[in-house]
Each structure stands twice: as C-alpha cells, then as structure tokens.
Amino acid sequence: MERNLPLCIVLALLVPFSTLSLVNAEVTDISTDKQALLALKARISHDPSNLLANNWSTTTSVCSWTGITCAGRHHRVTALNISNLALTGTLPPQLGNLSFLATLVIKNNSFYGSFPEELAHLHRLKYLSFGFNRLSGGLPENIFYNLPNLEFFSLPFNMLQGKLPSALSKCKKLQILSLSFNYFTGVIPKEIRILTQLKRLLLNNNKLQGMI
C-alpha cells in the first residue's frame, strides 16, 4: 500500500538539492569576473592602442579578451596579464572579486594610486607583478595574511612608501620578493628570515636600514 509523505518532509528533502544547485550556479558563473574586468576597463583613462576599448567587449566572451586566461573545472579567469600596453589608470577594488585568479601582471604601464586592499581576497594568487608603474602609498598589512599561495611578489620602480609589512612572513611559499626603487623606510622586518623558500630578495634603492 502506497503512503504519501507529508509535504514538510518532501520540502526538507528538496531544499538541500536546490541549495546545492544555486551554489554550483554561483561557482560556475563567470559574470562576476566580467564585472570586475569591466570595472578595471572603466578606470583606464589612457589606452593609446585602444586595445581594451575595442577588445574587451560586453558582446564577446571574457575568456577571448586580450590578456585574459580562463581555466579550471569552472572555467573562470585564472590569469590577467595586461603588461606593456602604455595604459594609464587606477586599480579598482573589484579586482578582489576575481576569486580564481592565480596570475596578476600589469607591469610596464602607468597605473597610479594605491595598492588595493581587496587583493587580500585572491586566496589562489601565486604570481603578482606590478613593476614599472606609478603606484603610491603603503602596502596594506592585512593582505599578506590571506595570500598563502603567493610565490612571486614584484613591485619595483613605483612610488610606494612606508614600512615593509612584517606580515610578509605569512606568505610561506614566497620565492621572489622584489621591492626595489621605491620609497620604503624603516627597518627591514626580521620576520623575513623565516621565509625558507625565498630565492631572491631585492630591496635596493629604498630608504631601509638594518640587517637581515
């Protein structure tokens, strides 16, 4: 004899599956990446070759845009490389929404303004290169607590200042640290010595003091 389950039990069984579907939809949705990149495009005031102006179009797939690499099971943006394009602009906080990003390279441009604290959200980030720009201000201490996979961190030839964050020591996988030709001051953090994977440390042409 068949028995009908009460409605409340049926709903209880269905809710977890519907929630899982919603979560999966959010994970595989690349629209978040698209909006973050469009926010970056909107912050660029000079694009002499009109490369991003013409190529980063809302009518085409993000994964086909210049400088963008998509990969992984969810086919999300894993690399952003817009180096050597003579771009002028600032870095938007929305870059922190590129949650699958492993490589972030904007070297040899004219980006100015502060280093976005929101990059602390990029937990998968391994490679960051912002050298040869005009970034100013200090390095936010908190970001280094949240970048456990960071291996390459390069910011030479900018206008950064302030003290070097001791939290750099939290990036246990760091192999290259290049901060030359900036305006950093104060004592070199002794905590850097615990970075056992470090292969190259470039701090020259700053106003640092002390011994490593």
Image: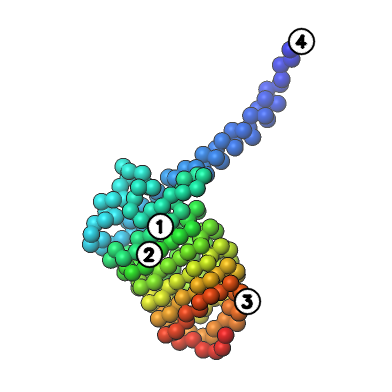
Tell me whether the residue at label 2 lies in contact with that at label 1, contact meaning CB atoms closer than 8 angstroms.
Answer: yes
Look at 64% across and 29% down and name the residue there.
14
Using the rendered image of the protein, determine whether residue 167 is visible from the camera's viewpoint.
no
Other-residue count near label 1 (Cα within 10 Å), few / some / many at <14 / 14–19 / ≥20: many
Other-residue count near label 4 (Cα within 10 Å), few / some / many at <14 / 14–19 / ≥20: few
Give the mark nearer the N terminus: 2 vs 4. 4
Q: Any mark on residue 106, and which?
A: 2
Residue that badge 3 annotates: 194
Q: Quadrant of residue 132?
A: bottom left
| In front: label 2 or label 4 | 2
Residue 174 percent location from the top left of the image? 55, 70
Label 4, secondary structure: give it. loop
Type of the residue with mark 3: Ile
Q: Any mark on residue 1, and which?
A: 4
Q: Any mark on residue 80, and which?
A: 1
Inter-mark Cα distance, 4 to 3 = 70 Å
Label 1, secondary structure: give it. strand
Type of the residue with mark 4: Met
Q: Quadrant of residue 193?
A: bottom right
